[in-house]
Amino acid sequence: MTLHINRLRSGGLITNYYCTSECGHCLYRCSPAWPRDYITPESARSLLRTVLRLGCREIHIGGGEPCLQPEGLCAVLDAARETGIGVEYVETNSSWYRSPEQARSFLERLRRHGLHTLLVSISPFHNEFIPLAKVRGVLEACRDTGMGVFPWIPDFLRDLGAFDPDRPHRLMEYAELFGEGYLESLPQRYWIAGGGRALETFGRFRPRRSAAAIAAEQNRGCGELREVGHFHVDLYGNYVPGLCAGFAIRHTDLGAPLPETEYPLLTRAAGRGIGAVLAYASAEQGFLPDEAGYASKCHLCYAIRRFLVQERNLDSPELQPRRHYAGDALPGSP
């Protein structure tokens, strides 16, 4: 069974992977180490036309931190309007906040370019890098300017409020205050995809099993790769299938069955599951599973992909952006 993405429902546009933060749950492994590339208006229009052609009429905008380049963000909002696709919200971590006046001016500018809602990130992950005072300042500026607010997640305001609002706080400070089970409980309180940096942050709380055991149990195609209810496309022209960050399909290849010659991992994963990916990587690329085992099929899949990029220096359209797998340790950009 091949992978064929011919219909899209709901998703987002990643304007940049550069971010002021390096959050422990980040699916896309965004950080200050990424290049400060930002999507061009031309690329945005091309991607949005593809998304619209496949049936998605409204997107959200995220990163990285999309608000770090106001000119670029306004150009993307203009491109969406020109393309005829709606913008549900723009995500932000509030790191750009400097003063009430500056924040109001920025939000009024975004409103003039058609934005009506801002998703404001609120969590202990973000508080490791961004003081609560900045988040509160953005929320207040939204109220002052009439910008709609999508707080994600407001329940954490009580937790963050237990600390000094004028400086960041490490996750371990939360564990020390609220108890040793606090970190382990976060995935149940904050919707977290089991990929990216979350594999390291939360994988240690899960039992490990051998690669062979995981492969034997997961012997069907990975349905996540066909999920089109929360997809993403990025500034480099990649479509991210499901929420499998680090996997990629060129957006120009959407709408037709993917050729196995160009997408050997994705087609095997979608058709026969992680076992087929493991067999291919072992036989064709010399991958040796870690004897310590893996916390999940996603953990195993990511280990295989990282091996192929780091150890085999594989430069493949399905393993993009390459920097996702090792930050500045990899040559070239992105």
Image (spheres, helix red, strand yellow):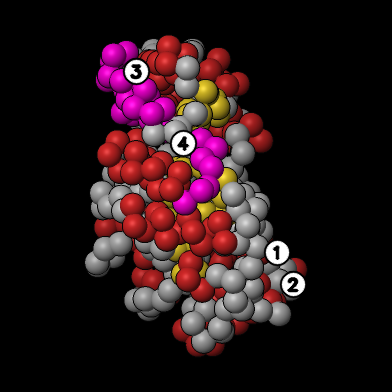
Q: Along the line of sight, which residue is nearer the eye, 208 or 226?
A: 226
Residue 211 in view of the camera: no
The residue drawn where x is 65% and y is 53% is 9
Q: Are marks 3 and 2 in contact (CB under 8 Å)?
A: no
Q: Are marks 2 and 1 in contact (CB under 8 Å)?
A: yes
> Which one is closest to the eye, mark 4 or mark 1?
4
- For the residues labelled 3 and 1, the Cα–Cα distance comes to 43 Å
Label 1 amino acid?
Answer: Gly
Q: Are marks 3 and 1 in contact (CB under 8 Å)?
A: no
Query: Of the residues under marks 2 and 4, which one precedes in the sequence?
Result: 4
Label 4 amino acid?
Answer: Val
- Mark 1, other Cα within 10 Å: few <14 / some 14–19 / many ≥20: few
- For the residues labelled 2 and 4, the Cα–Cα distance comes to 36 Å
Q: Do the residues labelled 2 and 4 touch (CB within 8 Å)?
A: no
Q: Which mark is residue 223?
A: 1
| Residue 271 position (above or below residue 236) | below
The residue drawn where x is 47% and y is 13% is 143
- For the residues labelled 3 and 2, the Cα–Cα distance comes to 51 Å
- Mark 3, other Cα within 10 Å: few <14 / some 14–19 / many ≥20: many
Secondary structure under badge 3? helix
The residue drawn where x is 30% and y is 50% is 38
Q: Which mark is residue 104?
A: 3
> Would residue 205 be found to the left or right of residue 135 on screen?
right
> Which one is closest to the eye, mark 3 or mark 1?
3
Label 3 amino acid?
Answer: Arg
Magenta stretch in the rendered image: 83-112
